[in-house]
Image: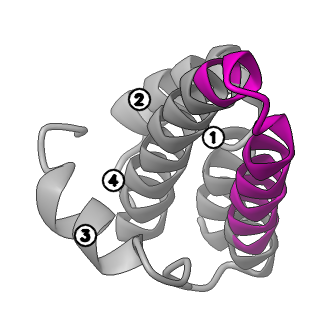
């Protein structure tokens, strides 16, 4: 059962398609793991943050501050990597700065 939870957690970080597959796997899992739900929420929050960072980068590029967008993108990548490593290890590892907020506000992901 632990391996199934780690698989669901890890797959959830691999693009939106991987997230949907992980969500379906968790819906069919019996009993449902808290680890899978934790990482589904966290990866969804990181995907939203990544989307917002992309929009910010486009806007900053128009005003000749694109390098700031690159820095933001690198920070989002580091958050994604921390989440993925936590999922592979089977740990409830909240990403820095936004992990608590994600777990509190992404309750609709079930």
Badge 2 or badge 1: first in the primary sequence = 1
Label drawn at residue 12 = 1
**Disc nearer the start of the sequence (4/3):** 4
Tell me which numbered mark, 2 or 3, is placed earlier along the sequence.
2
Q: Is residue 34 left or right of residue 42?
A: left
User: Which residue is the site of mark 3?
Assistant: 101
Predominant SS of the magenta segment: helix
Is label 2 or label 1 in front? 1
Residue 63 location in percent, x, y?
Answer: 67, 25
Q: Is residue 75 left or right of residue 104?
A: right
Inter-mark Cα distance, 4 to 3: 23 Å
In percent of width and height, residue 105 lies at 14, 56
The quarter of the rendered structure image containing the C terminus is top left
Residue nearest the observer in this picture, 104 or 98: 98
Q: Between label 2 and label 3, give the one nearer the viewer.
A: 3
Residue at 85%, 45% (x, y): give it.
70
Q: Are marks 2 and 3 in contact (CB under 8 Å)?
A: no
Q: How far is the residue under mark 2 from the one under mark 4?
A: 8 Å
* Residue at the disc numbered 2: 28
Q: Are marks 1 and 4 in contact (CB under 8 Å)?
A: no
Residue 83, above or below 22: below
How far is mark 1 from mark 4, CA to CA? 15 Å
Which residue is at a point 69% across and 55% down the rendered structure image? 76
Dot 4 falls on a residue whose secondary structure is: loop
| Residue 95 in picture, x, y percent from top left | 55, 77
Q: Which range of residues does the magenta coloring cover?
A: 58-82
Quarter of the image for the N terminus: give it: bottom right
- Taking the spot 62% from the left edge, 46% from the top edge, the residue there is 8
Q: Residue at x 68, y 66 (%)?
A: 79
- Distance, label 2 to label 3, CA atoms, is 27 Å
Classify 27 as above or below 3: above
């Amino acid at each position: 059962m632990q391996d199934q939870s780690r698989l669901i957690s890890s797959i959830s970080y691999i693009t939106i398609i991987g997230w949907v597959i992980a969500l379906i796997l968790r819906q069919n899992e019996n009993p449902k793991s808290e680890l899978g739900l934790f990482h589904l929420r966290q990866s969804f929050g990181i995907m939203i943050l990544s989307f917002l960072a992309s929009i910010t980068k486009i806007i900053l590029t128009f005003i000749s501050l694109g390098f700031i967008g690159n820095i933001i993108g690198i920070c989002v990548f580091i958050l994604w990597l921390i989440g993925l490593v936590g999922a592979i290890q089977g740990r409830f590892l909240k990403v820095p700065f936004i992990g608590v907020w994600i777990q509190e506000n992404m309750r609709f992901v079930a």
